[in-house]
Amino acid sequence: MDALSIGEVAARSGLAPSALRFYEQEGLITASRTAGGARRYPRSVLRRLAVVRAARNVGLSLPEIRAALATLPEGRPPTTDDWARLSSDWRDRLDEQIAALEQLRDGLTSCIGCGCLSLDRCALSNPGDVAGTGGAGARWLRPALRRAPG
């Protein structure tokens, strides 16, 4: 059988059925319907879901993932070449996150954990309190560390 039920896809992908319905609603995956209205997914959805999971691990947003998936041909699973192209596009994103995390790690010894990141003595995120004139908050925290999760 070429089509998989939502339960089979959930079991094989490790994702909850609610996540599959959400990804379908967001246009990341597609399903057909049986006469009774049950979802049926092509087997290729498992590879698409693997791409979605990898993209989420990199920190891509759903719109970014949707745009990446739109570059893949319809009707077939992503190939090794497809994956190489997509993953190379994410390399700069990962390098930015790695640099931001290294900066955070290296500056932790001077951080007192106050949370405001606007103290004049905060060498990690606000040397010289330049952000203090703009109000409280993480004004100088690198964008890769300011992204909202999920």
Image: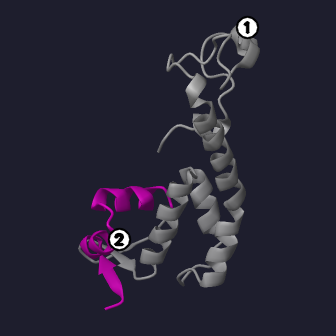
In front: 103, or 118?
103
Q: Position of residue 32 (x, y in %)?
A: 39, 75
**Residue located farthest toward the bottom when viewing the structure as drawn:** 1
Q: Amino acid at mark 1?
A: Thr
The residue stretch that appears in magenta: 1-27
**Residue 13 image offset from top left, x and y in percent:** 35, 71
> Could you tell me which residue is drawn at 32 percent across and 67 percent down?
14
Mark 1 neighbour density, 10 Å: few (under 14) some (14–19) many (20 or more): few
Q: Nearer the viewer, residue 3 or 38?
A: 3
Q: Main secondary structure of the magenta part?
A: helix
Q: In the picture provided, is 121 more to the left or to the right than 48?
A: right
Residue beneath the point at 57% across and 80% down = 78
Q: Residue at x 67, y 34 (%)?
A: 142
Against 46, residue 138 (above or below) is above
Residue identifier under label 2: 13
Colour scheme in the image? one colour
Residue labelled with disc 1:
133
- 59, above or below 120, in the image: below
Magenta highlight on residue 11? yes
